[in-house]
């Protein structure tokens, strides 16, 4: 980590390739931080979706004229085109957070499955052991990327889907639960055959086709009136 005015932090950028864009969801940047006593951010507006995981300490988030105080194992998400303020609150431990920024048309509906929306951009006690371990693996994988290649993209997308699936509550949601369960199934398949590159790529294509299909089903059954830019994969892919 490097020292800055308000924090000690590590910033990791990722340049997506063509395969990332075909997935309609991709990581943009990530990082870790330990806040100083004067830590304060805002007004802040971003062009993508940024998940912030609170690992230690306390933070106050302000959005749309509202305020919520968050603590260890809580998280919040910055949505594109909206203004946020957040600052550290007094605590026995300094504020420590990891963050992951995502982009693409699939991100918003997947975040909604986890209960995160522009009107309710936070979740309390959502950071389970699985969420923390998956987010750490994803950030580490991003930090290790030296140059883009298809295998890197598939590995990152498997971790992104696994992280989002681990945030979806284990309740009877019908179509949304089916989507989360299907992602978990593909994650298991990807993990089990990661050593075979050909099968790994095939599993990645299956993951893309399946998530697109189930998301389209979810949109149809939910009766959404707004157009959603989600494209099903060609089965010849």
Image (cartoon, grey):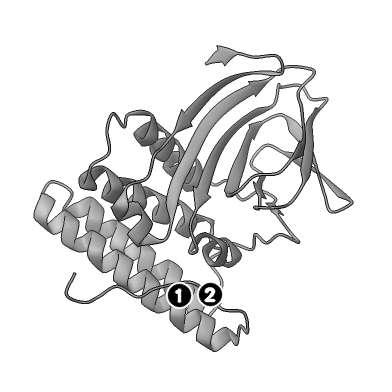
Question: Seen in the image, is 237 located left or right of residue 217?
Answer: left
Residue 215's spot in the image, x, y percent?
A: 45, 75
Up-down: is 199 above or below 33?
below
Up-down: is 150 above or below 144?
below
Closer-to-camera residue (29/222): 29
Figure label count: 2
Label 1's element?
A: helix
Residue 36's spot in the image, x, y percent?
A: 72, 17
Q: Do the residues labelled 1 and 2 touch (CB within 8 Å)?
A: yes
The residue under the point 60% across, 87% down is: 223
Q: Mark 2 points at which residue?
A: 228
The residue under the point 12% across, 50% down is: 197
Which numbered tag is attached to residue 215? Answer: 1
Residue 60's spot in the image, x, y percent?
A: 80, 38
Closer-to-camera residue (233/160): 233
Residue furthest to the top: 3
């Amino acid at each position: 980590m490097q020292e800055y005015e308000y924090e000690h932090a590590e910033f990791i950028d990722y340049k997506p390739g063509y395969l990332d864009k075909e997935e309609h969801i991709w990581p943009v940047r990530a990082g870790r931080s330990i806040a100083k006593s004067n830590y304060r951010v805002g007004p802040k507006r971003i062009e993508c979706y940024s998940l912030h995981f609170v690992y230690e300490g306390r933070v106050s988030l302000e959005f749309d004229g509202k305020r919520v105080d968050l603590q260890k194992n809580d998280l919040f998400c910055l949505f594109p085109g909206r203004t946020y303020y957040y600052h550290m609150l007094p605590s026995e431990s300094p504020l420590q957070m990891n963050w992951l920024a995502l982009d693409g048309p699939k991100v918003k509906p997947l975040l909604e499955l986890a209960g995160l929306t522009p009107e309710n951009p936070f979740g309390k006690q959502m950071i389970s052991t699985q969420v923390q371990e998956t987010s750490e693996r994803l950030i580490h994988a991003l930090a290790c990327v030296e140059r883009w290649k298809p295998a890197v993209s598939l590995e990152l997308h498997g971790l992104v889907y696994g992280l989002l699936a681990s945030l979806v509550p284990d309740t009877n949601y019908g179509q949304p639960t089916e989507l989360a369960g299907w992602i978990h199934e593909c994650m298991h398949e990807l993990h089990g055959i990661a050593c075979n590159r050909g099968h790994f790529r095939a599993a990645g294509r299956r993951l893309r086709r399946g998530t697109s299909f189930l998301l389209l089903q979810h949109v149809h059954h939910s009766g959404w009136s707004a157009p959603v830019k989600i494209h099903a994969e060609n089965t010849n892919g």
